[in-house]
């Protein structure tokens, strides 16, 4: 197992000790505690009302002011009627059941902190409509309409997205934008999508220089095209991920981001014009951008174009740091990416 999974998956009492998961995150999102110190809230009703959510629904739980560890009482597919606005100090923990958010608007993490999303599937997301959406027990705001992302992280800190399945959405799968930082994206399975992950709103959004994201132990599966991730302005440590496919490129960026590709496993597509892992959106002048490859494995003719000089280490604190394996170990480290089949009383193996 990788470092995150070995921290909790061997425990047969995971169902009665769910909050120990919050101690297992590594990388820049290591500070995310979610609802670790809150009560347990059980989702029993898959229906949705964006303005006046009913107790027992997912939306009712995520908008509460106090910390909550949110779990599910049964398998369910939740079709949201508008984007799901998350409040701070919340964990969505899908372990034990098959939980899907699909076929409607999906998740928005905006101007909050300490959010953990674990063990759910988010797919076939649609744009949200302009209209009223409740963001707390005391506030209903007018939204302009979401873009159709699976998960948008907007102006938020201490966010961890782990062991989710993400696919086939209208826009992106995960966007980290508008000065969001302290984010870890780990153990997820991505498939069948064009623009997978975007870090940084646009080239002129200077506030995104503070952004630091760790992308680790994920599997980028079949049917993916580009942006795994695409980075603007900020810093991304992309470590021990498996890339099964890309149709255009795997890792790209613009506006002088810093990208450290560290111990990944790249399998190039059978297309002679798509062997390069990297793509820079720039009309020259990118030779000083710090894009570095270390311990990566390249299969099928894949190659990484490096640039820049000087140190590129992620400068993690002691609690954030983890040992990055050589890319040859990645097929094993990512073999259980996506939601796990967790049975009460047994280890999640």
Image (spheres, rainbow, N blue to C red):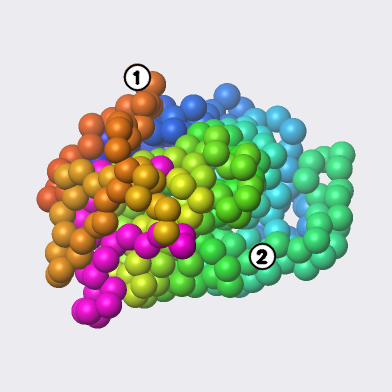
Identify the residue at horizontal 87%, vertical 39% (top origin): 138
CA neighbours of label 2 inside 10 A, class few (<14), some (14 to 19), many (20+): some
Disc 2 on helix, strand or loop?
loop
Measured from the top left, where is residue 12 in percent x and y?
A: 31, 37
Q: Is residue 158 magenta?
A: no
Q: Residue at x 24, y 74 (%)?
A: 269
Q: Residue furthest top?
A: 318
Can you identify the residue that label 1 sits on? Answer: 318
Residue 133 spot, x, y in % from top left: 81, 55
Q: Which mark is residue 147?
A: 2
Judge whether residue 129 can be spotted in this image.
Answer: yes
Describe residue 279's horizontal placement relative to residue 37 as left or right: left
Q: As drawn, is 252 to the left or to the right of 329?
A: right
Q: Residue at x 37, y 26 (%)?
A: 316
Q: Is residue 116 toward the left or the right of residue 106 in the image? A: left
Residue range highlighted in magenta: 258-283
Q: Position of residue 20 (x, y in %)?
A: 42, 29
Q: Is residue 78 visible?
A: no
């Amino acid at each position: 197992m990788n470092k995150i999974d070995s921290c909790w998956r061997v425990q047969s009492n995971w169902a009665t000790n769910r909050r120990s998961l919050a101690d297992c995150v590594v990388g820049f999102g290591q500070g995310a505690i979610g609802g670790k110190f809150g009560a347990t809230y059980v989702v029993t009703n898959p229906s949705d009302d964006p303005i006046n959510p009913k107790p027992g629904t997912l939306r009712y739980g995520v908008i509460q002011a106090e910390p909550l560890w949110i779990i599910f009482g049964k398998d369910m597919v939740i079709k949201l009627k508008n984007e799901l606005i998350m409040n701070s100090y919340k964990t969505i923990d899908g372990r034990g059941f098959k939980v899907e958010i699909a076929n409607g608007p999906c998740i928005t993490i905006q101007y909050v902190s300490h959010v953990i999303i674990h063990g759910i599937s988010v797919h076939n997301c649609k744009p949200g409509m302009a209209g009223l959406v409740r963001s707390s027990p005391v506030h209903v705001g007018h939204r302009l309409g979401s873009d159709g992302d699976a998960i948008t992280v907007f102006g938020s800190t201490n966010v961890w997205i782990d062991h989710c399945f993400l696919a086939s959405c209208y826009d992106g799968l995960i966007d980290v934008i508008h000065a969001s930082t302290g984010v870890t994206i780990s153990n997820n399975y991505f498939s069948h999508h064009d623009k997978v992950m975007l870090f940084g709103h646009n080239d002129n959004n200077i506030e995104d220089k503070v952004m630091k994201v760790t992308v680790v132990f994920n599997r980028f599966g079949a049917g993916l095209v580009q942006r795994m991730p695409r980075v603007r302005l900020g810093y991304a440590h992309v470590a021990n991920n498996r890339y099964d496919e890309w149709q255009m490129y795997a890792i790209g960026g613009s506006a002088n981001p810093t990208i450290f590709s560290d111990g990944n496993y790249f399998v190039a597509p059978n297309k002679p014009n798509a062997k390069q892992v990297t793509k820079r959106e720039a009309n020259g002048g990118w030779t000083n951008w710090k894009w570095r490859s270390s311990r990566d494995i390249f299969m099928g003719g894949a190659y990484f174009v490096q640039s820049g000089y000087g140190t590129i280490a992620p400068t993690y604190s002691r609690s954030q740091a983890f040992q990055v394996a050589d890319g040859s170990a990645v097929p094993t480290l990512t073999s259980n990416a996506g939601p796990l089949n967790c049975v009460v009383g047994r280890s999640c193996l």
